[in-house]
Amino acid sequence: MAHPPEPTIFALASAPGRAGVAVVRVSGEGASRVIDYMAGPRPDPRRAVGRFIRHPESGEKIDRGVVLWFPKPASFTGEDVVELHLHGGRAVVQAVLSALTLMPGLRMAEPGEFARRAFEAGKIDLAEVEGLADLIDAETEGQRRQALAQASGVLSDLYDGWRASLVEALGLIEAGIDFADEGDIGLKTFTDARSIIQVLVCAVTHHLEDGHRGEILREGFRVALVGPPNAGKSSLLNALARRDVAIVSAEAGTTRDVVEARLDLGGLPVIVSDTAGFRETEGAIEREGMRRSQATAEAADLVLWLTDATEPQTVLPAELAPLADRTLLVMNKTDLLPGGDAPVLPDDIVPLSVETGAGLGDLIKRLTVIASERIGHHGEPALTQVRHRRLVEACRDGLEAFLSGPTDEVELRAEDLRGAADALGRITGRVDVEDVLDHIFGRFCIGK
C-alpha cells in the first residue's frame, strides 16, 4: 500500500526582519504548482530567472523577484524545491507567506524540517547535519572552518572508514563461525580479525585523546578572571571586551556574581568570566560569590590570577592551588609603581596596567597563543559533540572487549564488534537513531 505523499512545506529561509533580499523556500510535490500559480512559466532547472510573484487566487502582483527551480532528486532535500528571492521588506515577505498558506497541500515548515528531509533522503548524514547547524551558529573563523569541515563530511568519512574495517573484521569472525568444523580456517579468520581491530583501536584511542579541542572550539575557550578584591578584574574584562560589561568601583566586593564576555581572538572563540574577589569575609553574599568564583575557575580552560602590583599576592589561595598548572599570573596597576615603569618579571607573570593600556596587547597575544595551542587547527578531524564522544568511547570499549575477551567465546566476540559498529553507525545515522533526531533537528531555525 503506497504511503500518501509528505505535505509540501515552505518557510522563510533567510533571516527574519527587514533586509535587501529575502528567500522563501518550498519543498515537496506541490513545489512545481507554486511556480505555475505564482511565478510561471516554469524556468529551466537551476537557472535563476526574473518573475513577477503573483497571488495564487487573484493574480495580483505581490513583488518582482528571482525564481529558482530544483527538480528532484537534485536538490537539498531530494524533493522538488522552489526558491523565491524577494525584496526583503516585511510586508512583501508576509504577503508571499500568506499567499502560500492558501494553496492546497502546503503548510509552514517546522524547525529543521528541510534538513531532516535531506537526511531522510540520504543527501546528508547526521554528523553533516550537526556540522551544518554549527556552521549557521559559527561566530568566529575557527568555528566556521571546523563546522564547514564537518558539514562537508570530514568526520563522516573518518567514521565510515572505521566502520568499514569493523565490518571486515566482523565478516571474518562470522566466516570462522560458519566454518567452525574447519579448525585452521576458524583460527586464521579470528587472527586476521584481531590484526584489524588492534590497528583500529589505536586510531580510535588517539582520536579520543585530543584534549577536547573540538568541543572547546565549538563552545568557546573559557578564561576565568580571579584574584583579590580591587585587583582590576572588572576593568580588565571591560578592556578585553572593549565595552562596559562589568560594574567598576573602588569599593571592594563590588562584583558578587559571574559576568561573562565573548571575544574573538585570532578567529578562536574565547569566553572571559569576571568573578568575585578572594578574601576573608563574614558576609554570606560575598562567601557565595567566592564559591561561584571557585566553581568558575575549576571549570575554566585557563585561569588568570590578577593581583595588584602595589600589593602583590602571587601565591594562589589553597582552594585554587590545584589549578596552578593552568593559571597565568597577571600583575595589574604597574602604572602606580615608583617611576611608572613596568617591572621586569619572570616569563610566567604578565605586567599590566588596565588604566593606561600598557601590557594589554601583550596579554591578548598571550591569551591567543594559549588558546591556539589548545584548540587551534591540528590538521586532524576533531570531536565536536558530546554525543559523538560518548559513541566513540562506546566503540572503543567494544573493541577493547573484543581484544581482551576469551578467544574461545567467538559468538560473544562477534557481539563485541557488532556493538562497536552500532555505536559508530549512530554518529552518522546508519542505524536506527530516532531517539536523537528530534534533539538534533530542533536546533535549526524554521527555514532550514
Image: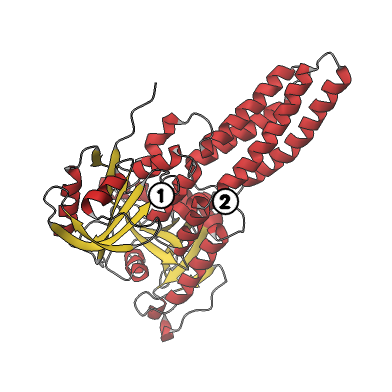
The location of residue 339, given as percent across then percent down, is: 42, 86
- Secondary structure of the residue carrying numbered label 2: helix
Residue 17 percent across, percent down from the top left: 21, 59
Q: Residue at x 18, y 43 (%)?
A: 101
Above or below for 164 versus 268: above
Q: Is residue 254 at least partly visible in the picture? A: no
* Real-space Cα separation, disc 2 to disc 1, in angstroms: 15 Å
Q: Is residue 335 left or right of residue 445?
A: right
Q: Nearer the viewer, residue 373 or 267?
A: 267
Q: Residue at x 79, y 35 (%)?
A: 195
Element marked by disc 1: helix
- Residue 4 is situated, as x and y percent measured from the top left of the image, at 33, 28
Looking at the picture, does residue 176 appear above or below residue 338? above
> Could you say where residue 297 lies in the image, as x and y percent from the top left?
43, 52
**What crowding class fits label 2: few (fewer than 14 Cα within 10 Å), some (14-19), or many (20 or more)?**
some
The tag earlier along the polypeptide, 2 or 1, is 1
Specify the farthest residue to the top: 181
Q: Amino acid at mark 1?
A: Ala
Residue at x 70% of width, y 39% of height: 200
Residue type, numbered disc 2: Val
Q: What residue sits right under mark 2 in the picture?
A: 154
Q: Disc 2, disc 1: CB below 8 Å? A: no
**Quick one: label 1, few (<14), some, or many (20+) residues within 10 Å?**
many
Which residue in the protein does label 1 denote?
A: 133
Report the front residue among 238 and 161.
161
Q: Residue furthest bottom?
A: 339
The residue sitting at 60% across, 59% down in the picture is 378
Q: Quadrant of residue 254?
A: bottom left
| Quarter of the image that includes the N terminus | top left
